[in-house]
Amino acid sequence: MAFKGMDVDILTGVHTQLTSLQGQLDTLIQQLTTQVNTAHEHWDGSDSTQFESEWASSHKVALTNASHAITSFASKLNSNIQAQEQTSSTY
């Protein structure tokens, strides 16, 4: 017979890792923003302004969106884990 359902212990570990990696991504975004700001403080001219603007309007936004997507993905996984635990406890 084929396995149906989920291994809650393993997927709880996956959820923990997703949450941890999302936190690491948020930290990386902050660190990159600090470095871009430092570069901008020590670099005058239109290239500097364009560099900072590109980071803020494109790259930072993309990374922040990825972070939000990971949070949503982890939340959905957690909901499925909770549902599986509830279903398993009724049998």
Image: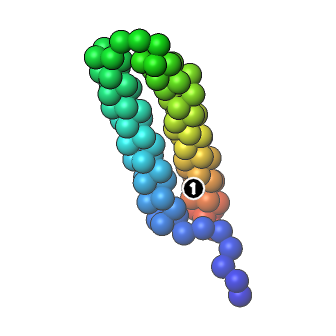
**49 lies left or right of 80:** left
**80 lies left or right of 60:** right
Res 79 visible: no
The residue furthest top is: 45
Q: Secondary structure at mark 1?
A: helix
Residue at horizontal 38%, vertical 42%? 24
Badge 1 local density, few (<14 within 10 Å), some, or many (20+)? many
Where is residue 9? Give x, y as percent: 46, 65
Residue at horizontal 71%, vertical 87%? 1
Res 14 visible: yes
Residue highlighted by disc 1: 81
> Which residue is more in the foreground, 86 or 15?
15
Please say if 57 is above or below 75: above
Colour approach in the figure: rainbow
Where is residue 54? Give x, y as percent: 53, 24
Q: Quadrant of residue 2?
A: bottom right
Please say if 48 is above or below 26: above
Where is residue 60? Give x, y as percent: 50, 29
Residue at horizontal 66%, vertical 79%? 3
Please say if 48 is above or below 9: above
The residue furthest bottom is: 1
Residue at horizontal 46%, vertical 23%? 51
Q: In which quadrant of the rendered image does the C terminus lie?
A: bottom right
- Looking at the rendered structure, the kind of residue marked 1 is Ile
